[in-house]
Image (cartoon, grey):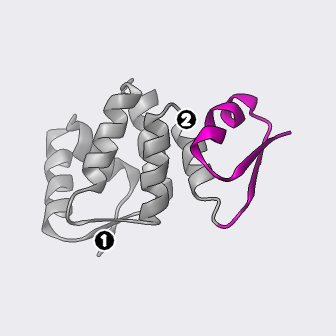
């Protein structure tokens, strides 16, 4: 199994550099690739910030990528939950932080907007400080 960097995932998804996209595709299709949560997080940021993709397009691309047979995600359940919450309107980073909170019973934040939007989505108490 090969762990991949954000740029490998981005090249695979956007195909803006044909040579790198082909090498990314070969790597991803020819064997198992490990994708950390931080790579997934940075990929969302790159697609949003640099490529100006809409949240719906980003969510669809990330879900499709995560569903590829050779892709192994770190903490797959948390990433899937974060993608669902992202599609429901949360910022992806916030959603991933909350989904990764493990056995915590409270999630503390100064972000009142996050608290308001996230509370209906989770059983974890969102504490707006």
Closer to us: 94 or 124: 124
Q: At numbered mark 1, what does the secondary structure look like: helix, strand or loop?
A: strand
* Relative image position of residue 77 (x, y in whole percent): 45, 62
* Relative image position of residue 9 (x, y in whole percent): 31, 50
Which dot marks residue 2?
Answer: 1
Q: Tell me: residue 63, above or below residue 86.
A: below
Which dot marks residue 44?
Answer: none
- Return the disc, 2 or 1, that comes first in the chain's sequence: 1
| Extent of the magenta region | 103-129
Q: Tell me: residue 115, above or below residue 63.
A: above
State whether residue 36 appears in this view.
Answer: no
Relative side of 20 to 57, left or right: left
- Structural crowding at the residue carrying mark 2, measured as other residues with C-alpha within 10 Å and reported as few (<14), some (14–19) or many (≥20): some
Q: Is 120 colored magenta in this rendering?
A: yes
> Where on the picture, by quarter, is residue 18?
top left
- Name the residue at 13% across, 59% down: 26
* Relative image position of residue 36 (x, y in whole percent): 45, 62
Closer to us: 80 or 9: 80
> Where on the picture, by quarter, is residue 61?
top left
- Name the residue at 35% across, 48% down: 7
Report the quarter where the C terminus lies.
Answer: top right
Report the quarter where the N terminus lies.
Answer: bottom left
Q: Tell me: residue 64, above or below residue 57.
A: below
Q: At numbered mark 2, what does the secondary structure look like: helix, strand or loop?
A: loop
> Where on the picture, by quarter, is residue 5?
bottom left
Relative side of 44 to 119, left or right: left
* Outermost residue to the right: 129
The residue beneath circle 2 is: 91
- Name the residue at 35% across, 35% down: 58
């Amino acid at each position: 199994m090969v762990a991949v960097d954000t740029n490998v995932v981005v090249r695979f998804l956007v195909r803006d550099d044909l040579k790198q996209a082909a090498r990314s595709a070969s790597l991803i299709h020819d064997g198992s690739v490990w994708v950390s949560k931080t790579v997934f997080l940075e990929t969302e940021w790159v697609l949003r910030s640099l490529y100006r993709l809409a949240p719906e397009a980003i969510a669809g691309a990330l879900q499709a990528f995560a569903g590829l047979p050779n892709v192994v995600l770190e903490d797959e359940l948390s990433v899937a939950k974060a993608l669902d919450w992202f599609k429901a309107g949360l910022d992806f980073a916030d959603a991933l932080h909350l989904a990764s909170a493990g056995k915590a019973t409270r999630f503390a934040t100064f972000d009142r907007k996050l608290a308001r939007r996230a509370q209906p989505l989770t059983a974890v108490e969102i504490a707006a400080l």
